[in-house]
Image: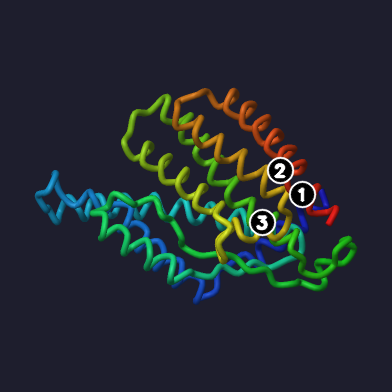
Amino acid sequence: MREIVDLKDKIKRYYGFTPLEARSLAIAILVTAFVFSFKEWGYGSAFDFKIGLFNYFNAILIVALSFLVHISVQRIWALGTGFRLEWKMWSFGLLFALIMAFLTNGFIWWLILPGGIMLHHMAGHRLGWFRYDINYWALGLTAATGTIASIILVIIFKALGAFVANSLIDKFIMFNIAYALCSLLPIPPLDGSRTFYGSRMFYAFSTSFILIMSILLISNISVGISLLLSFFAGIAFWISYYILFEHKAWRL
């Protein structure tokens, strides 16, 4: 109970986004939403500004909710472990995604590369922790929570889609699957790079788990079966990675 009260106090005092973070996040949302809705500015090859604007607005809602949940979970986890999280926009990633959308006429919409996170040490809130200062494991685990949050969103909206037929729900599911998979890429400053350097073993498990989970969810396999199969696939890949690579590396 004390931990919950402490976390609520941290969220109240430290959760807020800085003006720079808010501006950067707004730019990332607008650019990503434009890429996501690139092929929906009319019917077929006929351009229609009103239809495009309507679809762009829907895309902004999808992207904004997805980004905010992803980053908020990371932010709250960081506060719970005694760190303050800073989100930084990746200008090159956004520009690259935008260029690819134009070059492929919107076919490549799934390059979702908005930015990454940094942790700042909150000295008084880290007292009593085994690893007191900022470390790669804490950063990697915090980054992974965002990807997990995106997959949980997919599961929630997939369950919602079973009761309400709506194209926005389908778009939301596809966007978050793509977002989760892109987040796994071990390219700085994306979340995957933080997890990879935090623990290669954890990266092997989490990447295989989320990859298999995404494939099964797209294939309309039930959530329960998808979780079980993904978990066992993650364990199998984790063991294989250890035997084939990590075990040999430690012996060098």
- Determine whether 173 is above or below 32 in the image: above
116 vs 204, nearest the viewer: 204
Q: Residues within 10 Å of mark 2 (few under 14, many from 20)?
A: some
Q: Which image quadrant for residue 53?
A: bottom left
Which callout, 1 or 3, points to the residue nearer the camera?
1
Task: Determine the residue located farthest toward the left in the rendered image.
Answer: 46
Q: Is residue 238 left or right of residue 180?
A: right
- Residue topped by disc 1: 246
Q: Quadrant of residue 127?
A: bottom right
Q: Which residue is mark 2?
A: 241
Q: Foreground residue, 151 or 92? A: 92
In primary-sequence order, the first of circles 1 and 3 is 3
Q: Amino acid at mark 2?
A: Tyr
Left/right of residue 41 with respect to residue 80 in the rendered view: left
Instruction: Verify CB contact (< 8 Å) between mark 2 and mark 1.
Output: yes
Name the amino acid type tagged 1: Glu
